Amino acid sequence: MSRTLHDTFRSLAHRDYRLWVGAAIVSNTGTWMQRVAQDWLVLVDLTADSALAVGIVTGLQFLPMVLLAPWAGLIADRFEKRRILQVSQSLQGLLALGLGVLVIAGAAQVWHVYGFALALGVVTAFDAPARQTYVTSLVPPEDLPNAIGLNAATFHLGRLLGPASAGLLIAWVGTGPVFVINAVSFGFTVVVLALTRSRSPGQGTQGLSGLERMRQAVVYVRTRADIMLVLVLVFVVGTFGLNFQLTTAVMARIEFDRGPESYGLLGSFLAVGSLTGALVAAGRRRARLRLVVGAVTAFGLASCVAALMPTYWTFAAALVPVGLAALTLMTAANATVQLSTPPELRGRVMALYFAVFIGATPVGGPLIGWVAEAFGARWTIAVGGITALLAAAGAVAFLARRSTIEVRFRTDTRPHVVMVTAPKTDPDEDRVHPHDERVA
């Protein structure tokens, strides 16, 4: 037992990572509080239960991730990540404060929320790749898989605490103060970043222009069949299945006729499963492609079951395995991409990953909102489950036909060969080893 606990929390032995984890818990809790408050503000206070309006807000918030991903990844690779995060976290705090003031003053309108969501999306587009790759400067390489897993755990611990807290606060004092609390949480992160000793210097231009460096990352990803498979699975599930802000809101409000406390509680049930999955993932020492495919399958099955639940409480309970499967997918996919990408490309590749993962929401948010209004709230969950199962079936068929992947890519002027060998008789056929490079 003690050995298992040591494996699960071993990254906390490093001071800077401990500081980062503490800041992440506070900030993620505030972020989830704002997400719940934002959706409830639009769904109940500013519209007549318009799921489509909530979907538009969600889409606007994540659209910049698609458009700005190449530049965000380039900046993450070229400049010190700690400085990038200090700026991006400060701007997110100011945006939260601005929206909170509008709501408290009674001046907020739907178009205001649209504008703030879009602005937040722009800042988040530059924040995400820097935040994900900043972890690599806080722990040694051997602890990186554990650090990625614990990073996910902090996100979902915030998801556990945030929605329930937001639901209670909305019922007691309204949505405005929730935005202000989130603004304060970003201030805490900025202070912690100032206390961090670790530095993550940029890689410099290395004689290449910005466009050439962006093209370099795109070419690398296109020649990596294993990473491309992960991106396809993440896109499908992200588009149709990972719209929990919207789906739980419409289920609580429309299907079960519940208030904000019940809506927030659904987010906490999701987070129970997610946090459990994150802690299990943190104990793993390797990333496996098989785990990504298995998690997509489990997510599809769990979502279909949740869509059939007849009462609020059975639906809430069914969200626990949904959250567990979703977190397992997100952590396994993240680790697979990060650990098999060379450090000099990691920021740009992770930006592309998040462009696919989070950037799927501008498509999925409005689409799932339309599904809710056209076919009913339950179909918002069922569509995600069905498409996930279809994607998993396609991935299994692809892996069954392919046993060895050999790709070539160029970093600077040096040719490389990356081999991911998967003999059918090897039980660990899809194991992804950290950055297994061989110079040609």
Image: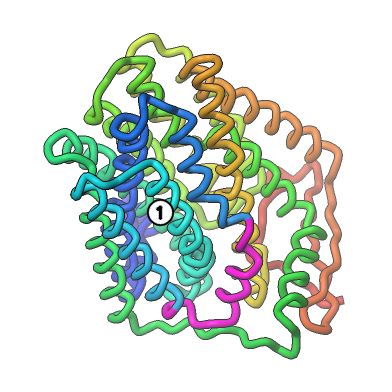
Q: How is the image coloured?
A: rainbow
Count of numbered circles on the image: 1
Residue drawn at the location 50% of the way across and 61% of the way down: 122
Q: Give 13 or 306, whichever is nearer the viewer.
A: 306
Mark 1 Cα shell of 10 Å, populated few (<14), some (14-19), many (≥20):
some
Instruction: Give coordinates of residue 430: x percent, y percent.
Output: 70, 48
Q: Is residue 340 left or right of residue 366?
A: right
Residue furthest front in the image: 107
Q: Give 8 or 31, whichever is nearer the viewer.
A: 31
Residue 112 belongs to magenta span: no
- The answer to whether residue 198 is above or below residue 98 is below
What range of the chain is rendered magenta?
67-83
Instruction: Give coordinates of residue 9: x percent, y percent.
Output: 35, 59
Instruction: Give coordinates of residue 375: x percent, y percent.
Output: 54, 14
| Res. 199 image quadrant | bottom left
Residue furthest left in the image: 172
Judge whether residue 221 can be spotted in this image.
yes
Where is mark 1, residue-wise?
116
| Secondary structure mostly seen in the magenta stretch | helix
